[in-house]
Image (cartoon, grey):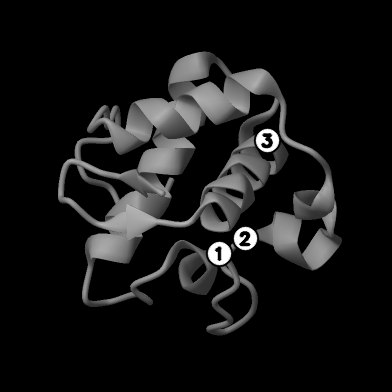
Amino acid sequence: MQTTATQQTFSAAELELLARLVQAEAGGESFKGKVAVAATVLNRVQSPLYPNTISGVIYQVSYGFQYCTVRKGTINRPAGAEAHRAVQEALQGNDPTGGALSF
């Protein structure tokens, strides 16, 4: 289990899912871009406007899928080391988006 700065605990499976989303959404982006994707998901988890779990946010369907990589299935591909590091950075409170709920 990992804990964020807000003390919310996430399972290893949820963190792996987040890393796969980061890989699928921002695989070709800079490390900062990858951290931004992870932070945005974590911001949504904290927002009352979205589900309160990582998987709930990622798989949310509201007027279609929230992330096209879910619809396309690319989220099912393995995450690279940099995507995992980006998730860890976001969990430690690094948020290049300044609290954004979308990107």
Residue 14 lies in what quarter of the image? bottom right
Q: Residue 19, located in which quarter of the rendered image?
A: top right
| Residue type for callout 1 | Ile
Mark nearest the camera among 2 and 3 is 3
- Percent x, y of residue 66: 56, 67
| Quadrant showing the C terminus | top left
Mark 2 sits on what residue? 67
Residue of label 1: 58
Disc 2 crowd, CA 10 A, few/some/many (<14, 14-19, 20+) = some
Label 1 secondary element: helix
Residue at the left extreme, as displayed: 6
The image shows residue 14, relative to residue 90, as above or below, that is below
Residue 79 located left or right of residue 9: right
In the figure, is residue 93 to the left or right of 37?
A: left
Q: Earlier in the sequence, mark 2 or mark 1?
A: 1
Residue bearing mark 3 = 23
Q: Position of residue 93 (x, y in %)?
A: 22, 33
**Badge 3 or badge 1: first in the primary sequence:** 3
Amino acid beneath label 3 = Gln
| Structural distance between the alpha carbons of marks 2 and 3 | 12 Å
Note whether 18 is above or below 80 in the view shown: below
